[in-house]
Image: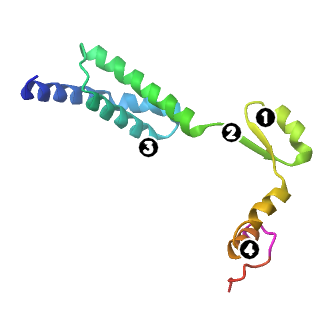
């Protein structure tokens, strides 16, 4: 393909993308509920298409591909980064929490385990953590 033809195709694709940008952002926002992230996903799709150097049959083919690519990228993002929801509860509340939170992962907060983890830290950092959670009066280096 000649350079002029390639440049013409890129220009046409950019114009088509610009005309769909707002609608694609709304489509992504519907999935993500975050405008900045939605715009970023749409721009990623645009760059992906440019890098793949795809040939489209016509305007409808471009639109169909872009909508599908944006939705797929949003779903992939949610699966990868949002993950499972977590609920932390006391040992005596575990059974009730497990029954109530059916889709979330339920963990027991064991104060002894937290204390063991804090004890593994250097003394200054351990004292800072204890101070921040209220189980210690002052860190050693506090003024």
Q: Is residue 24 above or below residue 134?
A: above
Pointer 3 or 4: first along the chain: 3
Instruction: Spot the residue most to the right.
Output: 92
Tell me the tag on residue 85.
2
Q: Main secondary structure of the magenta part?
A: loop
Q: Are marks 2 and 1 in contact (CB under 8 Å)?
A: yes
| Side of 65 relative to 78 (left or right) | left
**Which percent across, then down, holds residue 102?**
78, 30
Judging by the rendered image, the residue that carries numbered circle 3 is 36
**Residue positioned 75% across, 65% down in the render:** 118
**Which percent across, then down, holds residue 23?**
38, 28
Pointer 3 or 2: first along the chain: 3
- Which of discs 3 and 4 lies nearer the camera? The answer is 4
For marks 4 and 2, give the CA distance: 30 Å
Judging by the rendered image, the residue that carries numbered circle 4 is 127
Q: Is residue 30 visible?
A: no
Q: Is residue 12 above or below residue 89?
A: above
- Stretch of the chain drawn in magenta: 132-136
Tell me the tag on residue 101.
1
């Amino acid at each position: 393909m000649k350079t002029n033809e390639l440049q013409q195709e890129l220009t046409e694709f950019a114009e088509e993308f610009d005309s769909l940008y707002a609608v694609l952002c709304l489509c992504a926002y519907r999935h993500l509920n975050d405008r900045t992230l939605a715009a970023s996903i749409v721009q990623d799709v645009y760059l992906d298409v440019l890098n793949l150097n795809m040939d489209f049959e016509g305007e409808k083919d471009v639109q169909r591909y872009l909508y599908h690519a944006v939705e797929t990228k949003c779903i992939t993002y949610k699966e990868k980064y949002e993950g499972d929801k977590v609920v932390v509860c006391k040992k005596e509340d575990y059974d009730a929490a497990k029954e109530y939170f059916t889709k979330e992962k339920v963990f027991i907060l064991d104060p002894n385990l937290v204390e063991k983890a804090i004890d593994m830290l250097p003394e200054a950092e351990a004292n800072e953590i204890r101070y921040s959670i209220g189980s210690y009066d002052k860190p050693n280096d506090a003024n």
